[in-house]
Amino acid sequence: MRLFRLINYCFLILLLSAKTGWSQDKGKIDKCFETIKKGVQDTNLIIAYNELATEFLGSADEKAKTYGYNALELSKKLKHPYLTSWSYNIIGLSYDYLGKPDSALYNYQQAISIKQKLNDYDGLGAVNMNIGVMYYYQNDNINAIKYYNKSIEYYKKANNQNKIAGVLNNIGIIYRQDKKYNEALAIFQQAYDIKKKTFDTTGMANALGNLGVVYQYMGDYKKAELHHLQSMVLDSIKGNKYNLVSSYISLAELNFYLNNTNKTKISLEKAIALANTINAIHYLDDAYKVYTQHDSAIGDYKAAYFHLQQFNKYNDQILKEDRLKQMDKLETIFSTKEKEQQIKLLNANSELTDLKIKKQNNQLMFFISISALLILLLIAIIWVYKKTRKQQKELQFKNELINRALSEKDMLLKEIHHRVKNNLQIISSLLSIQSRYIKDEKALEAINESKERVNAISLLHQEIYQNDVLKLINAKVYLENLIQRIKDTFNPENTIKIKTDIDQIELDIDQLIPIGLIVNELLTNAYKYGTTNKNPEINFSFKEENGFISLSIKDNGIGIDSEKLANKTDSLGFKLVKTFTLKLKGELKIADEAGTLINITF
């Protein structure tokens, strides 16, 4: 519904303001890089890292996270609590953008803890606002409003009226979505009154637009039109062209509902003219859509057809990127299927060739036997000899074909493992996206655990296609990569010491899949529950002796009741460990030795 584009645009502006605090500034970026290049470890370097992290949010989130951690490490070293809390907040934002709400919330809480000690009420308002936005995107409106209200409390203590109005705007949007229109009107009116007192004309225009949208939902079109017109006057003064285009289209749609055909056409012409000057194709497609409806309603089908073509033109431009992505995805799927069929064909041809070789070998033996029995028949022997030589050449030629086919099959198998690894990474990404919309904590934890299990299997397929020998894989390389990935997830700051002792052992994929999943479960569990010690440490061992392999993971935490854990039935992770231990025909032992020790021998 075109009329409501204004509210979404306004809300986006508020979110960007709350999350980043400043717009892109190339001069500031260059200045930050100059500060980093100097290498002087002072507060200016911390600020440069934090500002670069802020700048890259939303466009290069991994890079933003890296700069945030650089700032965090230096601020801790220099013992600067304010800059430390700033770094935690930015790292939380980067995890939020990366679709990792659990990591985001952890860093937000760290920032809140420091800011409370500093009585930084404005900063506390900003962090709680960020948490509210995070929950909003997870469709958890209850928690979103909870943290928005906390944010308002802190902003009141800091006497930051503009930020209070911004948070009120976000609360009003939730009320509007929940069809609590009276509550939404009251909230948006509060936001407008605050913006009016602070002479923030852009904020006033946004609040008026929000009120207009709510009035249209309520069917009060006159008030809706009045508020949109007032919003457009303020946007004209400030030169907010994107807001004006949106308002013209909203006003046109409103007049279309009221059968004011002349006003509808005038508003649409103004919207199209202004949108063309700023190349706003996302607005042009909406404008031509309303124009098509308008022309059809008044019976001008020639104009309706022309405007429909314009709508399709701009709509196609918007959808072009999505279509290309979908085509790439379908091409990948087709390519994988095609290679699978090629492998099946090669296997069938190989089996047929084997049968022919066996048949030819039998014939050869037959002729040799006849030659021995009929030694006096020299002509027959010569004939058999010549035929045998010919067959040997044919066999040699066919063996070369078979070896070539087997080589191609190995290449195709590696490609399949590569595709499988890519598809598993897609599944992991889908699980990350899905976790943003899950409200139940247990369900969210289960999703995240599943994602780590998928990553463990994906990493193994990566090792396979990078290996020269498909049958056997170097377990040391695979386990070291898996341990590093788990460490990056649960201990990115490297506060937990981990020692490894891994032998050079070559194992096949049927062994490494259960081993990888067991290590994923046990090491994840160690990071979660075995690092309560003041100096947390995890020891990982994978050794071979006398034809047996011993896998051990030990932490120096509070320990565990081994009998209770051995009989535990409600833990999916422990069930998987026991199941895969049986698959390996191994023996599982649990001990409490100044921490928890788990050993599997197979």
Image (spheres, helix red, strand yellow):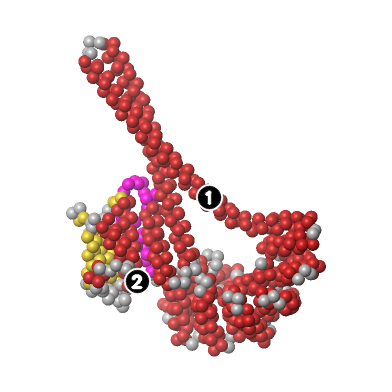
Q: Which residues are magenta?
A: 463-490
* Magenta stretch: includes residue 473: yes
Q: Can you say whether 144 is above or below 291 in the image?
A: below
In the image, what residue occupies the spot 38% across and 38% down?
Answer: 347
* Magenta stretch: includes residue 89: no
Q: Nearer the viewer, residue 580 or 513?
A: 580
Q: What's the CA distance linking mark 1 and mark 2? A: 39 Å
Q: Quadrant of residue 524?
A: bottom left
Quadrant (top left, top right, bottom left, bottom right) of the N terminus: bottom right
Amino acid type, residue under disc 1 in the picture: Leu
Q: Nearer the viewer, residue 407 or 5?
A: 5
Residue 353, percent across and down? 36, 31
- Find disc 2 in the rendering and name its residue: 528
Callout in the foreground (1, 2): 1
* Crowding near the residue tagged with mark 1, few <14, some 14–19, many ≥20 C-alpha atoms within 10 Å: few
Kind of element beneath mark 2 = helix
Residue 233 can be seen in this image: yes
Query: Residue 99 vs residue 462: left or right?
Result: right
Residue 14 can be seen in this image: no
In the image, what residue occupies the spot 59% across and 85% down?
Answer: 160
In the image, what residue occupies the spot 69% across and 55% down?
Answer: 313
Q: In terms of sequence position, does the residue under pointer 1 or pointer 2 come before the other?
A: 1
Residue 125, numbered label: none
- Find disc 1 in the rendering and name its residue: 330
